[in-house]
Image: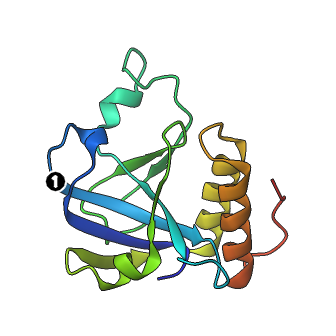
């Protein structure tokens, strides 16, 4: 996987969601690099709970990015990336060999730049993780980004 890869993880189970397993969509943001052991992948999830971001919704004040299915038809429906939610980390090799993960598509470089600058401004991503993402984007040709 490389930054910008969108995948669906069937039966995703993490305590953040009350211990319930369900399918979740993720965006691969980058990793810790080839010299770290193990290589950790940084991923973020999306949500289709669009009403939560409307005025009066429980995430109305969250910084977010709207992802339109019309632009990226590999998504099942419109969704939102919430910058005020912590990213996940997982061993890269586990992601790439997990039969529960299905790659759905890839976001273009300009959209990845938009995602990066939202992450760069977020208080929920550590400077180390932002630097990992910055380096990963540079490696695939997305250069000129501000460093954390």
Farthest residue to the front: give it: 37
* Image coords of residue 28 (percent x, y): 48, 69
Label 1 packing within 10 angstroms: few (<14), some (14-19), many (20+): few
Camera-side residue of 88 and 45 = 88
* Looking at the image, residue 23 lies above or below residue 48: below
Rendered residue at 67%/83% (across/down): 35
Provide residue 114's location: percent of width, then percent of height.
Answer: 65, 57
Q: Describe residue 19's horizontal placement relative to residue 53 as left or right.
A: left
Q: Is residue 55 rendered to the left or right of residue 14?
A: right
Element carrying mark 1: strand
- What x and y, as percent, mark residue 101? 26, 75
Q: Nearer the viewer, residue 21 or 143?
A: 21
The residue that disc 1 covers is 22
For the point 68% across and 66% down, which residue is it? 132
Q: Residue at x 65, y 36 (%)?
A: 123
Residue at the top extreme of this rendering: 56
In this picture, residue 60 sits left or right of residue 114? left
Residue 42 rendering spot, x and y as whole percentages:
52, 63
Residue 34 occupies which quadrant of the picture? bottom right
Q: Is residue 20 above or below residue 5?
A: above
Give the camera-side residue of 38 and 108.
38
Query: Residue sitting at 66 percent across and 65 percent down?
Result: 133
Place residue 72 in its image quadrant: bottom left
Q: Is residue 70 among the parts visible in the rendering?
A: no
Q: Please give left or right for residue 116 compared with residue 100 in the image.
A: right
Residue 38 seen in the figure: yes
């Amino acid at each position: 996987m490389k930054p910008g890869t969108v995948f669906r993880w069937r039966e995703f189970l993490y305590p953040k969601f009350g211990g319930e397993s369900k399918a979740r969509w993720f965006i691969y943001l980058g990793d810790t690099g080839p010299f770290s052991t193990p290589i950790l992948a940084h991923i973020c999830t999306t949500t289709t709970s669009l009403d939560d971001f409307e005025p009066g919704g429980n995430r109305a004040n969250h910084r977010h990015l709207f992802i339109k299915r019309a632009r990226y038809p590999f998504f099942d429906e419109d969704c939102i990336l919430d910058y005020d939610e912590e990213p996940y980390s997982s061993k890269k090799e586990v992601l790439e060999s997990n039969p529960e993960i299905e790659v759905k598509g890839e976001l273009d470089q300009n959209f990845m730049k938009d995602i990066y600058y939202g992450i760069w401004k977020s208080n929920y991503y550590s400077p180390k993780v932002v630097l990992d993402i910055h380096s990963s984007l540079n490696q695939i040709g997305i250069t000129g980004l501000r460093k954390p």
